[in-house]
Image: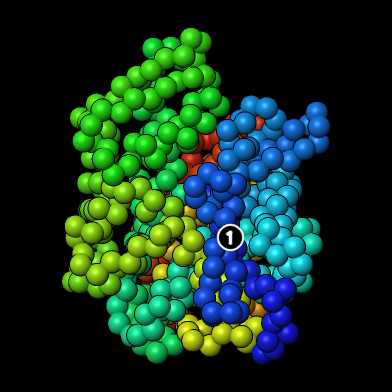
């Protein structure tokens, strides 16, 4: 297929699987442009919530807005992308059904459509185990042989941007996603893109804002209500809070799920007070990640909120907003797929160089991985539970090492000692060991004794090594 001209019935797909919502695009052979496919079912947005519901009584699967608004009628699965890598079969099953449903939409634009290649855009922070489960999802969905590549969000968005602006220079990429607000200043020189700076914030995300919107509406109600009803209402009404004239006139909200139904008026001051803290944090974040006047590229579902666009527009002159910010990921993925198959060469493949991806993994005792090579330093690296298979008495010494590239390549970084442990037989001492990076070059290691049931309760022993080692990113 590589290098060949496709027929009008053959499609190269870009799929963006996000934790909050997902989107789909294809590469248009007639004009060399990526084109969006509407997944909303008439809800006014091209994307759809990454939510799946299974109704046991009928065996039916429900997706997107219908699953979200029908919350409580069956078993609902959400937060799916963040739960990849946890070995949860329910997650992979739900995602398998979702991928099949999303890709079936290609038939809406051409009943004879044949998918010849898929590139999936995924969050930068996904672990290797999560990616492996994602590949398993495509295999189970029947598209394993069509999956050309999974590409990090930033690569897809930058490809989309340089498709329209194929020139060297600096670009500030702001990705306002479900779990994080991420910012990176990228410098392009030919096919090399260097990450000059990179920051993230968990305090500003669609997840935190969605939760705040639910609390906001809950505070307007005189009586308590079910979370499912409140979540569905907040999703349907969220955009009204962030519309262009929000804060300029009162807005009436109708709580029709109450008995009797009630109407509540929200004043401009209430809306302004709600949005202001997020605007302030957003401005502080942008100032911390960039100086000067680069071209600013805005992607992610958060930029569907007008206040977020207004903040960026007030700080920079040269800003690119996509009509649907969510679509930048999947449109870039479609371009990457077309490039892989040899039908598109306007923008070359990029070599993205930065010191935010770890040059090696980190193990404990040369056997148990704590962090994987290629992970971003700013990711959340969950602590690992370790069972000590030897008797313990008073003190335990552990070796921190680089992940071996081969069995003979085990490079110790140092040791860490856990003191004041009680005397215990083998295989009854469990430890929690976690790595937390404080910068691209330094990390801490924390070890805690968490015991083993009622017979061997935790001793409370713990230790944390500060700035344990400096990482040389040229390694």
The type of colouring in the image is: rainbow
Q: Position of residue 466 (x, y in %)?
A: 36, 56
Q: How many marks?
A: 1
Tell me if 400 is positioned left or right of 289 in this view. right
Q: Residue furthest top?
A: 260
Q: Position of residue 310 (x, y in %)?
A: 25, 53
Residue 361 makes an appearance in the image: no
Quarter of the image for residue 217 reads top left
Residue 409 higher or lower than 333, as above or below? below
Tell me if 143 is positioned left or right of 459 in this view. right
Quarter of the image for residue 160 reads bottom left
Tell me if 263 is positioned left or right of 116 in this view. left
Name the secondary structure under disc 1: strand
Quarter of the image for residue 60 reads top right
Residue 315 makes an appearance in the image: yes
> Which residue appears at 29% of the width and 25% of the height?
266
Which residue bears the numbered disc 1?
Answer: 37
Q: Nearer the viewer, residue 181 or 422?
A: 181
Q: Position of residue 397 (x, y in %)?
A: 54, 56
Residue 261 higher or lower than 461, as above or below? above
> Which residue appears at 65% of the width and 49% of the height?
86
> Which residue appears at 25% of the width and 73% of the height?
294
The N terminus lies in quadrant: bottom right
The 10 Å Cα crowd at callout 1, few under 14, some 14 to 19, many 20 or more, is many
Q: Nearer the viewer, residue 427 or 379?
A: 379
Q: Position of residue 242 (x, y in %)?
A: 33, 41
> Which residue appears at 69% of the width and 89% of the height?
4
């Amino acid at each position: 297929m590589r290098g060949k001209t496709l027929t009008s019935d053959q499609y190269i797909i870009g799929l963006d699987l996000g934790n909050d919502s997902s989107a789909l695009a294809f590469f248009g052979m007639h004009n060399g442009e990526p084109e969006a496919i509407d997944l909303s079912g008439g809800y006014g947005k091209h994307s759809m919530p990454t939510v799946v519901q299974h109704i046991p009584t009928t065996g039916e699967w429900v997706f997107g807005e219908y699953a979200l608004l029908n919350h409580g009628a069956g078993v609902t699965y959400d937060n799916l992308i963040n739960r990849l890598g946890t070995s949860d079969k329910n997650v992979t099953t739900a995602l398998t059904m979702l991928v099949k449903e999303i890709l079936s939409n290609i038939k809406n634009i051409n009943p004879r459509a044949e998918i010849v290649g898929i590139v999936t855009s995924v969050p930068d922070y996904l672990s290797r185990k999560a990616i492996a489960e994602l590949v398993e999802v495509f295999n189970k969905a029947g598209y394993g042989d069509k999956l050309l590549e999974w590409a990090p969000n930033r690569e897809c968005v930058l490809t989309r941007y340089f498709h329209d602006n194929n020139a060297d220079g600096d670009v500030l990429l702001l990705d306002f996603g479900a779990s994080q607000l991420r910012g990176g200043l990228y410098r392009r020189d030919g096919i090399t893109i260097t990450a000059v700076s990179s920051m993230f914030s968990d305090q500003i995300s669609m997840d935190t804002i969605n939760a705040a919107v639910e609390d906001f509406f809950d505070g307007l109600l005189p009586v308590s209500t079910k979370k499912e009803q409140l979540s569905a209402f907040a999703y349907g009404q969220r955009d009204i809070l962030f519309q262009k004239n929000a804060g300029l006139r009162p807005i009436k909200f109708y709580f029709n799920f109450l008995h009797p139904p009630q109407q509540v008026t929200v004043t401009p001051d209430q809306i302004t007070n709600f949005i202001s803290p997020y605007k302030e944090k957003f401005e502080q974040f942008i100032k911390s990640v960039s100086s000067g006047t680069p071209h600013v590229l805005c992607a992610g579902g958060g930029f569907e909120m007008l206040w977020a666009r207004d903040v960026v527009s007030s700080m920079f002159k040269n800003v690119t907003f996509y009509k649907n910010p969510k679509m930048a990921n999947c449109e870039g993925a479609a371009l990457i797929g077309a490039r892989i198959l040899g039908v598109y060469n306007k923008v070359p493949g990029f070599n993205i160089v930065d010191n935010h991806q770890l040059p090696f993994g980190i193990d404990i005792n040369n056997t148990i991985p704590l962090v994987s090579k290629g992970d971003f330093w700013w990711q959340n690296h969950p602590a690992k539970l370790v069972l000590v298979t030897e008797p313990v008495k008073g003190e335990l010494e552990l070796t921190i090492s680089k992940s071996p590239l081969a069995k003979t390549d085990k490079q110790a970084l140092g040791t860490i000692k856990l003191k004041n442990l009680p005397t215990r037989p083998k295989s009854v001492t469990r430890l929690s060991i976690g790595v937390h990076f404080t910068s691209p070059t330094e990390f801490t290691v924390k070890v805690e004794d968490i015991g083993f049931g009622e017979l061997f309760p935790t001793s409370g022993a713990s230790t944390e090594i500060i700035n344990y080692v400096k990482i040389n990113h040229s390694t």
